[in-house]
Image (tube, helix red, strand yellow):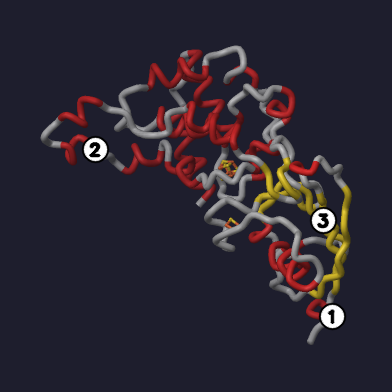
Amino acid sequence: MSEQDKRTVTLRVSRINRSQGSGVHFDSFQVPVQRWTTVLDALLYAKQYSDHSIAIRYSCRMASCGSCGMKINGIPRLACYTKISEIEHDTITCEPLSNFPAIRDLVTDFGQFFAHHKEMQPYIQNKAVESSNERLSGFQQSPEDVDKFLQFSYCIKCGLCYSACPTVATDTKFPGPQALAQAYRYFADSRDAESKKRLKIIDDRHGIWRCHFAGSCSAVCPKGVDPALGIQLLRGHMLGFSSNEKKIAQLKNRSSK
Ligand code: SF4
Ligand code: FES
């Protein structure tokens, strides 16, 4: 067994219980890890062998469900997608995502995040096609049409971008990068017929213009979505500068594959 395989790390877990009004403190656990051990594995080890009461939200363990987001050494990441061997430090600090109210330990309240997502009406709206007898032919798209929105449809709603956003931190009415990226995803879909309505929803003093283009949303996304790009493309449309949009979206889709 190599030295890497024998490593032991200290897991520092943020503890809070909102229903009991308790303040935040950290508990530390010694966890043996191997090359493939993820932060989620380490947390589950601590929960099984040291403290059953550690609260964690997770499901798929394969970066698909979006439920295990947390701050790992200060950076929003998926616990199931972060291998401890990739982290240089021997102390791993796990905290709830910023910009989400903590419920208990690492479990946060996603109510506001999903409310913003819902505000964007994230589904195709096209009355003409819905009432047509030729429904299928009405929904046909070329590969170029799909390229325009494809990367944005990979979003798993994990909230990492929302947690990293400095604008969300100062304005909870701002929809945030995930919702705005989804606004672009449906705006750019050639099957949708409500593009004007979609732009109106985000053209608000707490809306798209509040983005400072920090770019932290795109930097932390585990699925290669570039919310900052979606926001810029939407702004381009609102200002009447959209001629390069198709080219930019295609280049970005290719670079994220
Ligand atoms: S855009 Fe990326 S970081 Fe944001 S919620 Fe979707 S998958 Fe998560
Ligand atoms: S457990 Fe599903 S994304 Fe991590």
Relative vertical location of residue 103 with respect to residue 204 in this rendering, above or below:
below
User: Going 65% across and 43% down the picture, which residue do you hit?
Assistant: 160
Q: Disc 3 or disc 2, which is closer to the eye?
A: 3
**Residue 119: horizontal and vertical position, in percent?**
49, 26
Farthest residue to the left: give it: 133
C-alpha distance separating marks 3 and 2: 49 Å
* Sequence-first disc among 3 and 2: 3
Q: Tag 3: residue type? A: Val
SS under mark 3? strand
Q: Tag 1: residue type? A: Glu
Quadrant of the rendering where the N terminus is positioned: bottom right
Residue count near mark 1 (Cα–Cα under 10 Å), binned few <14, some 14–19, many ≥20 = few
User: Going 48% across and 15% down the picture, which residue do you hit?
Assistant: 238
C-alpha distance separating marks 3 and 1: 25 Å
| Along the line of sight, the residue nearer the viewer: 100 or 136 | 100
Q: Is residue 182 left or right of residue 36?
A: left
SS under mark 1? loop
User: Going 45% across and 39% down the picture, which residue do you hit?
Assistant: 250
Residue 133: image quadrant is top left
Farthest residue to the front: give it: 20
Residue count near mark 2 (Cα–Cα under 10 Å), binned few <14, some 14–19, many ≥20 = few
* Sequence-first disc among 2 and 1: 1
| Along the line of sight, the residue nearer the viewer: 104 or 220 | 104
Which circle marks residue 13 in the picture? Answer: 3
Ligand 2 located in image quadrant: bottom right
User: Going 41% across and 32% down the picture, which residue do you hit?
Assistant: 186
Relative vertical location of residue 137 with respect to residue 172 in this rendering, above or below:
below
**Residue 28: horizontal and vertical position, in percent?**
88, 61
| Mark 2 lies on residue | 139
